[in-house]
Image (spheres, rainbow, N blue to C red):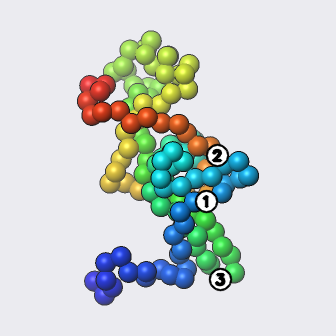
């Protein structure tokens, strides 16, 4: 590897940010409680935990991108392993029971973030 570990290789083209204002009332950060977001990609809604935020410069254009760790729903619409009553209650409460995939990350533009999401981390093996 030609560079030292944690060397600022991408600077000045990619600058890490601690906080990003999406709108006047919506801001995200890699730290709790503003780090769980809902994004809309190709018409489908996905959830993710903000890992890092970057401001990237392409010539004269400045773009804000967010590195997310996906939250995969454990009880989806087509999942038959959970009872239908339990799934219906999750739907009524607008609740997602999911698992954060720590080893997978993906970049999204800040314009695809549509809302912050409240979350609570459960102890391992709480739901089985």
Spatial distance from mark 3 to mark 2, Cα to Cα?
27 Å
Q: Which residue is mark 2?
A: 114
Q: What residue sits 36% from the left and 47% below the top?
A: 101
Judge the density around disc 3: few (<14), some (14-19), many (≥20) Cα neighbours within 10 Å.
Answer: few
Relative to 117, is 97 on the left or the right?
left
Spatial distance from mark 1 to mark 3, Cα to Cα?
21 Å
Which marked residue is nearer to the observer: mark 1 or mark 2? 1
Relative to 73, is 113 on the left or the right?
right
> Residue 96 at x, y = what percent?
47, 31
Q: Earlier in the sequence, mark 3 or mark 2?
A: 3
Q: What residue sits 54% from the left and 22% below the top?
A: 93
Judge the density around disc 2: few (<14), some (14-19), many (≥20) Cα neighbours within 10 Å.
Answer: some
Quarter occupied by the N terminus: bottom left
Residue 34 appears in the figure:
yes
Judge the density around disc 1: few (<14), some (14-19), many (≥20) Cα neighbours within 10 Å.
Answer: some
- SS for callout 2: strand
Residue 73 appears in the figure:
no
What is the number of the mark on residue 34? Answer: none
Relative to 4, does residue 105 appear above or below in the rendering? above
Q: Which residue is mark 3?
A: 59
Q: What residue sits 39% from the left and 36% below the top?
A: 121
Q: What residue sits 53% from the left and 37% below the top?
A: 118
What is the number of the mark on residue 20? Answer: 1
């Amino acid at each position: 590897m030609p560079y030292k570990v944690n060397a600022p290789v991408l600077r000045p083209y990619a600058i890490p940010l601690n906080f990003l204002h999406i709108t006047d009332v919506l801001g995200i950060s890699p730290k709790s409680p503003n780090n769980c977001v809902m994004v809309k990609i190709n018409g489908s809604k996905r959830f993710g935990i903000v890992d890092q935020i970057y401001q990237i410069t392409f010539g004269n254009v400045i773009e804000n991108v967010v590195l997310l760790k996906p939250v995969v729903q454990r009880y989806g619409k087509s999942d038959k392993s959970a009872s239908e009553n339990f799934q219906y209650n999750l739907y009524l409460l607008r609740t997602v029971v999911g698992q954060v995939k720590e080893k997978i990350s993906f970049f999204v533009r800040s314009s695809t973030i549509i809302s912050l999401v409240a979350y609570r981390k459960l102890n391992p093996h709480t739901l089985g």
